[in-house]
Image: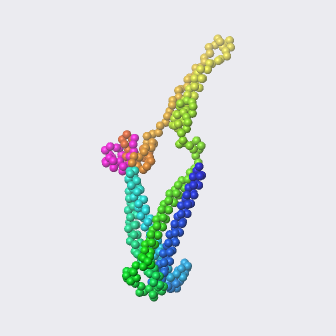
């Protein structure tokens, strides 16, 4: 059963990883397409077409990295395409992460976990700061990209393929007035928005797939640990109910409760010892006597009865018992001794039967010193 669970989760993680790879390749393809169009736009705008290997300062560096044949148009196009692609992905990442942090904070507040709620709020504020810094910078890069996109489309429509022919190309508004509402101009107008929509869609898909892959990886890791974790046979199905054996009531109770089993064992040992004692005392003493011995008094020592056995049940000290922390994390427990030693975190009732999270107790009761004894 464990092996089949591990196999299923391994297949699931593999499929999610494959989907991640396909989405990332699609993003790289869109980025390269934008780079190719931007390079044409920069070439038509009249940038220097000299190979970078001929540069007097950094020519050898570019040539060492295999960029000797590249031009300034290639550098500008690569920089803009990379900035727009990665910036769009980061913007969607910050937006989706901010939504998750908001919902996580609401869950923590409902559970009374003030510490994690404050941590989520701090992460949400930092996420908003990152978004505020990135959004205007990305907007400027997108505006430049849009203008170059339209410039390239218009030059292709009119048939301009050299920089000396594009220097007097009319701007967008004047071209619309002179040429009218043609279908080609309409495509050139919506083209940049279509590119932005495709880039945003792929960025959203990549972010969602990465999230799903992380969750699947957690389940796969748990299945892997469970696969190599072995338990004794008597503990393999401890959660399933067991049928009580026929016999004495204490034996049936011992099967249902481990503590009852210890008590039953001690009880059985005491009863066996008492039975042996009664057996020794009830056995008749037979002594073979001769006629001479009959005239001599025989002193038979009396058997001292064994002291009765007492049943001793050891109960843990109160300081070593664990209590549920009211208002703490989900399922949080703490020893009484630890709670008493940490007064800044816990509040212990005077009867020492309940342990409260200090922040939660303060929100409910105000001053905790008036009704509870602080842990000291």
Q: Position of residue 129 (x, y in %)?
A: 38, 66
Up the image or down, 61 lies above or below 20; here it is: below
Magenta stretch: includes residue 373: yes
Q: Position of residue 348 (x, y in %)?
A: 38, 44
| Residue at screen point 40% across, 41% down | 353
| Residue at screen point 39% across, 55% down | 106
Up the image or down, 263 lies above or below 165; here it is: above
Q: Is residue 314 left or right of residue 328?
A: right
Q: Nearer the viewer, residue 189 or 102?
A: 189
Picture quadrant of residue 176: bottom left
Up the image or down, 105 lies above or below 298; here it is: below
Q: Nearer the viewer, residue 79 or 373?
A: 79
Magenta stretch: includes residue 30: no
* Number of numbered discs on residues: 0
Q: From where the camera sits, is residue 198 visible?
A: yes
Q: Nearer the viewer, residue 227 or 303?
A: 227
Q: From where the camera sits, is residue 224 visible?
A: no
What range is drawn magenta here? 353-376
Up the image or down, 154 lies above or below 3; here it is: below
């Amino acid at each position: 059963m464990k092996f089949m669970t591990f196999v299923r989760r391994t297949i699931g993680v593999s499929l999610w990883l494959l989907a991640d790879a396909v989405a990332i390749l699609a993003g790289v393809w869109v980025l390269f397409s934008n780079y190719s169009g931007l390079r044409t736009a920069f070439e038509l705008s009249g940038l220097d077409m000299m190979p970078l290997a001929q540069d007097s300062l950094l020519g050898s560096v570019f040539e060492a990295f295999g960029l000797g044949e590249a031009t300034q148009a290639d550098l500008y196009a690569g920089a803009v395409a990379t900035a727009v692609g990665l910036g769009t992905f980061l913007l969607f990442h910050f937006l989706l992460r901010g939504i998750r942090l908001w919902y996580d904070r609401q869950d923590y507040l409902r559970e009374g976990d003030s510490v994690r709620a404050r941590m989520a709020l701090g992460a949400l504020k930092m996420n908003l700061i990152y978004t505020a810094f990135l959004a205007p910078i990305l907007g400027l890069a997108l505006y430049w990209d849009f203008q170059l996109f339209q410039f390239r489309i218009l030059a292709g429509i009119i048939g301009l393929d050299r920089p000396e022919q594009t220097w007097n190309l009319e701007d967008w508004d004047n071209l619309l007035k002179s040429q009218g509402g043609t279908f080609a101009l309409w495509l050139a107008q919506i083209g940049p928005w279509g590119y932005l929509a495709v880039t945003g869609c792929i960025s959203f898909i990549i972010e969602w797939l990465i999230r799903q892959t992380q969750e699947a990886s957690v389940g796969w890791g748990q299945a892997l640990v469970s696969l190599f974790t072995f338990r004794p046979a008597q503990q393999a199905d401890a959660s399933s109910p067991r049928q009580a054996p026929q016999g004495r009531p204490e034996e049936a109770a011992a099967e249902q409760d481990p503590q009852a089993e210890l008590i039953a064992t001690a009880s059985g040992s005491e009863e066996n010892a008492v039975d042996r004692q009664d057996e020794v005392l009830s056995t008749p003493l037979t002594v073979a006597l001769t006629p001479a011995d009959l005239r001599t008094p025989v002193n038979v020592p009396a058997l001292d009865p064994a002291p009765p056995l007492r049943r001793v049940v050891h109960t843990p000290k109160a300081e070593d018992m664990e209590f549920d922390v009211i208002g703490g994390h989900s399922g949080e427990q703490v020893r009484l001794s630890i709670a008493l030693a940490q007064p800044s975190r816990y509040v212990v009732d005077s009867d020492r039967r309940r342990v409260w999270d200090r922040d939660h107790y303060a929100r409910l009761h105000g001053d905790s010193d008036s009704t509870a004894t602080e842990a000291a």
